[in-house]
Amino acid sequence: MIHSEYNALAEVLTGFSTCLQAGEKVLIDAYDVPEAMVIALVRMARSKGAIAFTNLQNARISRELVSNGSEEQFATQVKWELARMQAMDAYIALRGSDNIFENSDVAPAQLQLAMKCLKPVLDYRVNQTKWVILRWPTPSMAQQAMMSTEAFEAFFFRVCTLDYQRMVPGMEALRERMEQTDRVRISGPGTDLEFSIRGMKAIPCGGRHNIPDGEVFTAPIRDSVEGHITYNAPTAYQGVSFDRVALTFSKGRIVKADGTNSERLNAILDADEGARYIGEFAIGFNPHILNPMRDILFDEKIAGSFHFTPGQAYEETDNGNRSQVHWDLVSIQRPDYGGGEIWFDDTLVRKDGLFVVPGLDALNPDALLQPET
């Protein structure tokens, strides 16, 4: 049976998110996801005249392939994956996981080798197709969120089928403000940062690429970052948990990195030269997402948060940084997480997680969740 929630989500993904048109080819990449959801997506894509293709994956099998894979194996894999991606107009990924730490015992060198070899597929997908990615609700995710399975599923579908169109006016105001800004200053517990975004584009994200969504991102001028930051949202990256990450910058480069799993943290940042520079700065404002759950597609959209990302810059906001790493580390600035401020030049734009500038305040939770009249 295909649940009504599946059809509603499939409509969002094939409609608002990827805007599938007649004749377009879409790859549905399903990672430990119920067959009924994949079928709902195939049928919804067909209803729009699109041509659907599927790729079904399994986390434990993928772990085995990566943990002992050779460069020859990955080089062969990238040939067919890149050829397939180049034949697509759109890409929809649903990623479930019974265990987010499935890759925790895979050697970092193996993960880095796989990421390096397969990067051309990722680059083509990000820059040349219409794409959207979302997680799939599982009991494991419910545990991460410290919720019952039933409550988490209700939360998931409520967040993922949000009327993202309501974010557009506020996102546009924030985009304009960011593109007019030179210096950004961010302060809070353990954080005193300053950097430039002068001349950089800002990109609103309201359900086009990620579900759930709710952010506007740009990138700092690569060598402009000075100061230090302590991220207060726990995270998981490459199958490893990090409860605290603290970074110190000089001339844009991370010169000191400390926190839980410090050795693994520095191994990630030493993957290549670009991993010690910042490729993205983004402000999050999804009104339904309030607390971290070690899932970056949710956590980077937390209301009152920002993320400051070591690694690869996006093509749309390219500051020249190149890396196999793109690690969205999150800091929450609401009072219950210690508060904080964001300044654009000499203007305070957000205090303790709430926008304080007219126009931008349309992105505060009270505005986004206000009943329509």
Image (spheres, rainbow, N blue to C red):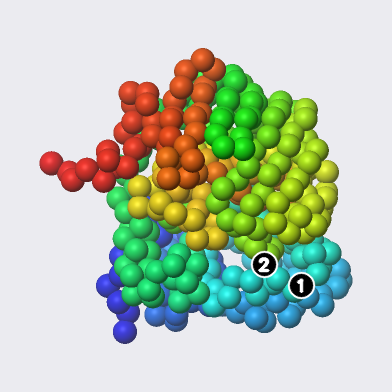
Find disc 2 in the rendering and name its residue.
Answer: 239
Label 1 to label 2: alpha-carbon separation: 8 Å
Q: Secondary structure at mark 2?
A: loop
Task: Report whether residue 117 is seen.
Answer: no
For the residue pair 249 and 323, the one nearer the viewer reads as 249
Amino acid carrying label 2: it is Gly
Amino acid carrying label 1: it is Val
Quick one: label 1 or label 2, which is nearer the N terminus? 1
Find disc 1 in the rendering and name its residue.
Answer: 106
Identify which residue is drawn at 69% across, 39% down.
Answer: 278
Residue 304 quadrant: top left
Q: Are marks 1 and 2 in contact (CB under 8 Å)?
A: yes
Residue 231 quadrant: top right
Q: Secondary structure at mark 1?
A: loop
Residue farthest toward the left in the current orientation of the protein: 373
Q: Is residue 119 above or below residue 67?
A: above
For the residue pair 301 and 126, the one nearer the viewer reads as 301
Q: How many marks?
A: 2
Q: Is residue 148 above or below residue 301?
A: below
Indicate the position of residue 38 as horizontal and vertical percent values.
44, 75
For the residue pair 145 and 75, the one nearer the viewer reads as 145
Which image quarter is the N terminus in? bottom left
Indicate the position of residue 110 as horizontal and vertical percent values.
81, 68
Q: Residues within 10 Å of mark 1 (few under 14, many from 20)?
A: some
Residue farthest toward the bottom in the current orientation of the protein: 1
Residue farthest toward the top in the current orientation of the protein: 346
Q: Is residue 310 above or below residue 118?
A: above
